[in-house]
Amino acid sequence: MRRCAVDGGPICLGGTGDGFDLSSPAASAYVKGLNGKANRYWNSLTQIGCCQGRVFSDLDMTDGVSGTYTRSGNMGDTLQRLAVLSMAWATRGCDLYHDGGVLNGIIKAADYVAGHFFQKGRFTNRSAYGNWYHWEITCPTALGSIAMVLYDQLGADRVRLYAEAIQYHAPYCTQGGPNSDGPAMTGGNLLLKANGVAQAGILLEDASMLENVRAGVKGAIVYNGPGRLFALGGGEDGFYADGSYIQHQRLPYIAGYGADFYRNYGMFALTLRGTDWDVTPSEGEAALICDFVFHGIEPFLAGTRTMDMVAGRDVTRSGRSDRKRTANILCALLSLRGTFPTAEQNQRFDRMMKFFLSRDPDGYYSRMDSITPVRIAGELMADCSVKPRSGYALTKTFAMDRTVHHTSGFTLGIPLPPSMWTMA
């Protein structure tokens, strides 16, 4: 079995080496944001310990008769916080960096979750409680991240325990899970689930899981025919040639699942490069992925904001905003730098990204979720040969019933309400 490159070594996390310059504005803002978040989580963790169904005081994970969606969500949030703590422990410049007490606390908490809630064999006589998304996407991805970041500290037995728990709940990314009512995966959801599957496949050295990830990524890179958009029987998720992006059959969602697609695609391209499961796109796939940046993403960005009308259900979620969505999109796209088919496209991408990054650099850097986009952003902003985009103008109506109008003085977006959709 050919080994995969794992983006989780000390240089990637800022621990040692020359690959991460803490004096750069991008790196310092990123570390400051990670440090603040991790300190809040650590203070909450140490106050409650691991007992009575919770690791953090505000996240009860127990399986109750009512509120099970909340309880499964709390389990996912718990593991996500522990993943953040793991990153802070491994990132030079954070207060928790290589603190032995912090490491022991993270491991104790992760063991508690993996031993009492998200474990192999948990459901044999009934389906998982709560939301399938937490069991098949949130928890696998977060627990896999903990195992990757703390790999050398956890030991082989504990790493296998975590990875087998992921494998049990999410053995493949192209179908619903065996222990819940999850649907078959499509679009950004498919790549989100593939993240956890890929991590478990790498940790377990399971070629079949990685082959499933490759098939899932390749299956998600496709344009759908316009006749399926908003079809009466349910539209096709994913990309459309005019720049439309749909998730959940009829929701314009480039600012949510679309960003998830690009973030995870970039991670797979980097991690699996040169292995038997390389997802390097064909010429046609590369054109789709790259062209869509300009045809389907750029039109919905305005200064520091992303238009709510392509954010789907994300506009209703607590703690989200159009500015945060812009940070997520920019973070997701940065891994594409230098990969476009032509020099003109690479130059256009650099100028576009420099324009948006310069609007609120500290805000974007502090919200990025890994070292790689931070490093790329820092390099781009320091490149004096790249001039920010200027003079952007566009008027376009998309098949997903969204119209945008960009001029030098203002930007306008017009959504057609769902009640007015014409069903084909």
Image (cartoon, rainbow, N blue to C red):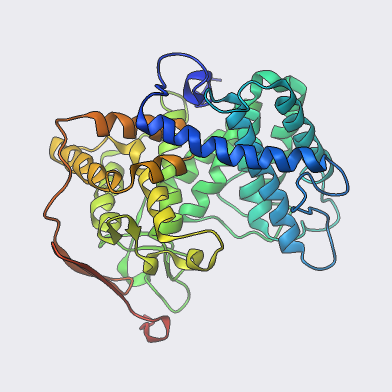
**Residue 140 image offset from top left, x and y in percent:** 65, 42
| Residue 171 position (above or below residue 276) | below
Q: Tell me which residue sits at (64%, 20%) in the image.
A: 98
Q: In this view, which residue lies farthest toward the top?
A: 17
**Residue 213 image offset from top left, x and y in percent:** 52, 40
**Drawn side of residue 282 relative to residue 407, left or right:** right
**Drawn side of residue 202 relative to residue 62, left or right:** left
| Residue 413 position (above or below residue 287) | below
| Residue 78 position (above or below residue 230) | above
**Drawn side of residue 240 relative to residue 61, left or right:** left
Q: Tell me which residue sits at (63%, 43%) in the image.
A: 80
Residue 237 shows up from this direction: yes
Q: Tell me which residue sits at (49%, 63%) in the image.
A: 314
Camera-side residue of 6 and 61: 61
**Residue 176 image offset from top left, x and y in percent:** 63, 55
| Residue 158 quadrant | top right
Residue 171 shows up from this direction: no
Q: How many marks?
A: 0
Q: Quadrant of the N terminus?
A: top right
| Residue 374 quadrant | top left
| Residue 401 position (above or below residue 75) | below
Camera-side residue of 5 and 94: 94
Q: In this view, which residue lies farthest toward the bottom?
A: 420
**Residue 24 image offset from top left, x and y in percent:** 36, 27
Q: Tell me which residue sits at (47%, 26%) in the image.
A: 276
